Image (spheres, rainbow, N blue to C red):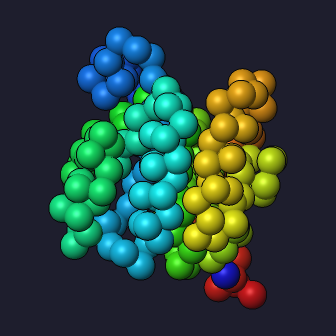
Amino acid sequence: TIPNGVDLDVFNPRFRSGGWRHHIAGKKNKTIILSVSRLAWEKDLMTLVETYRLLQANKINSVLTIAGTGPAHEALKNLMPKAKFLGFLQKKDLRTAYASSDMFLFPSSTETFGNVTVEAMASGLVPIVADAGGSKTIVQNRTNGLLSKPKNSQDFYKNILLLLKNKNLKNQLAETAIKHAKKYSWDKVLNLLFKKYEE
């Protein structure tokens, strides 16, 4: 199969912004956990809510930040009052959000590919994703990200803690994630497509 491509000039760690981080996390230097998704319940958003509740209950110094919109938007705001909702972001704002966050949380187990995961990786984020669907074809556990049991908030929470407690592992996975994302550059994807046509 031919994967989707990602524009590596757009999604890149160089767009990290201290100003954006301060706007989201304030002076307390909280860990910014980003989720980018259409806000529809079939994206396993209850797993996101339950993971948020675990972070809150255990007083983890973090802020869950959500980019995207959809039918579940208002309900999610009520369920996660301390999360930051960014709404729909244009490409320029989205690239800043990716590059300026600390980790990427994506619980959806129904993706066929998962463009957002590759965009996050290209931006230097460690993806914490469901071990299902398109996500598990992109992420290799403990190599370029972390796989979590689908619909299991405890497992997603455990993986967040693993990165928080182990900075070396986090940096190593981020580095490998960036390298892996380069496989999805448009040049490589189009070359693959032309090869298939030639065959």
Left or right of residue 24, residue 176 in this image: right
Query: Can residue 49 be seen in this snapshot?
Result: yes
Instruction: In the rendered view, tell whether residue 21 sits above or below residue 65.
Output: above
Query: Can residue 6 be seen in this snapshot?
Result: no
Please report the residue visible at 35 percent of the width from the left and 24 percent of the height from the top. 25
Q: Position of residue 161 (x, y in %)?
A: 66, 38
Residue in the foreground of this view, choosing between 170 and 55: 55
Q: Quadrant of residue 187?
A: bottom right
Left or right of residue 187, residue 192 in this image: right
How many numbered discs sit on the rendered protein?
0
Q: Residue furthest front?
A: 57
Q: Quadrant of residue 186?
A: bottom right
Instruction: In the rendered view, tell whether residue 151 sits above or below residue 181.
Output: below
Q: Residue furthest top?
A: 27
Q: Position of residue 174 (x, y in %)?
A: 67, 36
Please report the residue visible at 68 percent of the width from the left and 56 percent of the height from the top. 155
Instruction: In the rendered view, tell whether residue 173 sits above or below residue 52.
Output: above
Which quadrant holds the N terminus? bottom right
Which quadrant holds the C terminus? bottom right
Please report the residue visible at 18 percent of the width from the left and 61 percent of the height from the top. 74
Residue in the foreground of this view, choosing between 82 and 34: 82
Q: Position of residue 60 (x, y in %)?
A: 52, 31
Please report the residue visible at 58 percent of the width from the left and 70 percent of the height from the top. 151
Q: Position of residue 77 (x, y in %)?
A: 24, 54
